Image (tube, helix red, strand yellow):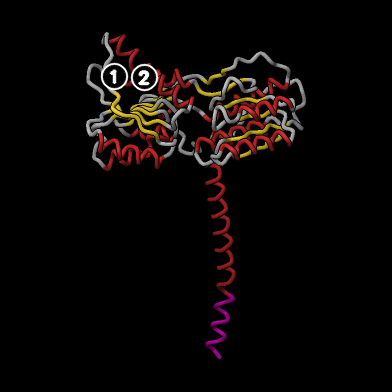
């Protein structure tokens, strides 16, 4: 009987302490969750507020992405959403799921919902022309963002980074870095026929040759091969593995996008060639690329293609259109910017989506 009483008393004694510990742990966990949530906030969560002479409440901004299966597309989506809502408007979005037919259907759905402005990132420059004409017939202005569309389409303006100028900056940097030393170049591209990739490639090659002519009085450009990556980590890895077998003398990799080459780095490292190959990207300023630039010597530079700024600009132009502006240039660019070891820390945000 004594033992039972003792056990009962001990339970009475420790139960309040146990309860306090549980409460303390719950509060501690809640604070940690809040800290994680706070640390994950980045520039993608902050939209700008634009001047408007009309009441924007009740206005609807529709956005259709070719896919959301990449950090860049996610960051662009978040920027448009945040900026739209910060300006008191309703955000409606659709995902093309990396399928042209699904993207067409998704845009048609946004048109049916009566959006006041349509922001469209077309997967294909020709296939989406028809839906822009449907939007025009419904009185909905179309803004093409990030990518490009055929001139036959009906749209107000295209909002993107200056792909040609960014590529030129990266190519010029590479030519200065190598000077008179020979370059054996492998080119990693996104996918065949992509207009943005083609412009970035043009900028890279133009930057290299112009700088060589200016400083050497000749062109020493040896592109050994081009490989397509489908704008993916896995595609870059496979392409680089094949390139290293077929062209072991490659000492430079130039690429149309950071994402094309991030997977390739694994193949380069596995081959023990991080000291022998220099990487230069014509875009995008992805955080993983910027980290490599800061911490290594094999990732030389990239150029800024900010999804956050493009998203903000797109919503701003939609607001300006609603306020009566019609004289837009057909191309609207963000400012070109080269990221190197000297300024990389300024643009590195470990909490960014992209």
> Would you name the residue on which mark 1 appears?
221
Which element type, helix, strand or loop, lies under badge 1?
A: loop
Quarter occupied by the N terminus: bottom right
x and y percentages locating residue 14 in the rendered image: 55, 72
Q: Which mark is residue 244?
A: none
User: Residues in magenta?
Assistant: 1-12
Q: Which mark is residue 205?
A: 2
Q: Is residue 177 left or right of residue 139?
A: left
> Which is nearer the eye, 146 or 351?
146
Residue shown at the point (29%, 35%) measured from the top left = 243
Query: Total marks drawn?
Result: 2
Q: Find out whether residue 7 is within the magenta segment.
A: yes
Residue shown at the point (27%, 31%) measured from the top left = 277
Q: Is residue 283 left or right of residue 332?
A: left
Q: Find out whether residue 244 is within the magenta segment.
A: no
Check if mark 2's residue and mark 1's residue have beta carbons within 8 Å.
yes
How crowded is the residue under tag 1: few (<14 C-alpha within 10 Å), some, or many (20+)? Answer: some
């Amino acid at each position: 009987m004594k033992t039972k009483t003792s056990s009962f008393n001990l339970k009475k004694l420790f139960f309040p302490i146990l309860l306090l510990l549980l409460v303390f742990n719950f509060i501690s966990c809640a604070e940690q969750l809040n800290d994680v949530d706070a640390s994950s906030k980045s520039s993608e969560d902050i939209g700008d507020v634009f001047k408007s002479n009309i009441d924007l409440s009740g206005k609807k901004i529709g956005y259709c992405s070719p896919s959301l299966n990449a950090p860049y597309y996610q960051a662009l989506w978040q920027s448009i959403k945040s900026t739209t809502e910060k300006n008191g408007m309703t955000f409606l979005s659709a995902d093309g799921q990396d399928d042209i037919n699904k993207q067409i259907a998704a845009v048609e759905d946004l048109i049916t919902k009566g959006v006041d402005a349509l922001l469209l990132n077309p997967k294909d420059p020709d296939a989406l022309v028809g839906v822009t004409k449907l939007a025009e017939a419904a009185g909905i202005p179309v803004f093409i963002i990030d990518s490009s569309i055929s001139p036959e389409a009906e749209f107000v303006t295209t909002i993107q980074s200056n792909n040609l100028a960014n590529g030129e900056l990266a190519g010029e940097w590479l030519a200065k870095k190598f000077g008179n030393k020979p370059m054996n170049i492998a080119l990693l591209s996104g996918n065949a026929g992509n207009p943005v990739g083609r412009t970035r490639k043009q900028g890279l090659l133009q930057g290299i040759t112009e700088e060589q002519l200016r400083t050497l009085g000749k062109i020493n450009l040896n592109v050994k091969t081009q490989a397509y990556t489908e704008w993916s980590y896995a595609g870059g890895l496979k392409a680089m593995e094949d390139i290293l077998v077929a062209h072991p003398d490659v000492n430079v990799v130039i690429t149309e996008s950071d994402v094309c080459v991030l997977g390739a780095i694994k193949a380069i490292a596995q081959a023990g060639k991080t000291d022998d190959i220099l990487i230069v990207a014509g875009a995008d300023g992805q955080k993983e690329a910027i980290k490599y630039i800061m911490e290594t010597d094999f990732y030389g530079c990239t150029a800024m293609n900010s999804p956050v700024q493009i998203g903000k600009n797109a919503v701003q132009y939609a607001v300006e259109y609603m306020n009566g502006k019609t004289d837009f240039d057909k191309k609207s660019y963000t400012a070109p910017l080269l990221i190197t070891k000297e300024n990389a820390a300024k643009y590195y945000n470990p909490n960014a989506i992209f």
